[in-house]
Amino acid sequence: RVQLVESGGGSVQSGGSLRLSCVASGYGFRDFCMAWFRQSPGKQREAVAAIGSGGTKSYTDYVKGRFTISRDNDKKTLYLEMNNLKPEDSAMYYCQASANVVSFPVVEGAQCHGYERTYWGEGTLVTVSS
């Protein structure tokens, strides 16, 4: 079973930076497609960024140029570097792992496609004040 634990959230002022981490336990991290999602109170969970097992990246438009997703397979860790943060970035940020390819895997629209299983972490809270 895959478990994901996020960390790095906190409170910052507008224009500030944070680096989120997601550590995975279990086997197979190198083959997982990984992604970050976020959810604000009263809103649906939305995709932020994704990175495939081969390193292909995809970002949603509102974070392009400000956020960078990366992974360290040896450490089984996913990162999200967030710069120039805005109040509208305030949300609970969740890490997602996609495993078991069932069709041609694609990283598109800040999400992983073509996988059978997904796993989620419990989230880390980011608050950006103006």
Image (cartoon, rainbow, N blue to C red):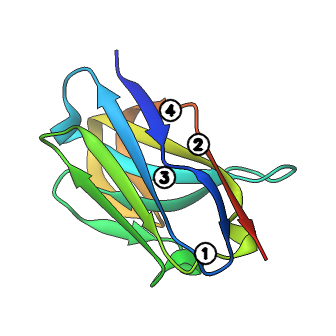
User: Dot 2: what SS?
Assistant: strand
Asked if labels 3 and 2 touch by Cβ distance under 8 angstroms, the answer is: no
Q: What's under tag 2, amino acid-wise?
A: Thr
| Residue at which label 3 appears | 36
Name the one closer to the observer, 13 or 94.
Answer: 13
| Residue at which label 2 appears | 124
| Residue at which label 4 appears | 120
Q: Is residue 101 above or below residue 93?
A: above
Q: Earlier in the sequence, mark 4 or mark 1?
A: 1
Asked if labels 1 and 4 touch by Cβ distance under 8 angstroms, the answer is: no
Neighbours of disc 4 within 10 Å: few (<14), some (14-19), many (20+): some
Residue 124 occupies quadrant: top right
Of labels 2 and 4, the one closer to you? 2
User: Dot 4: what SS?
Assistant: strand
Q: Is residue 11 above or below residue 65?
A: above
Of labels 1 and 3, the one closer to you? 1
Disc 4/disc 1 C-alpha distance (Å): 24 Å
Residue drawn at x 12%, y 40% is: 74
Q: What's under tag 3, amino acid-wise?
A: Trp
Residue drawn at x 33%, y 48% is: 78
Q: Is residue 92 left or right of residue 107?
A: right
Disc 2/disc 3 C-alpha distance (Å): 11 Å
Q: Earlier in the sequence, mark 2 or mark 1?
A: 1
Name the one closer to the observer, 126 or 47.
Answer: 126
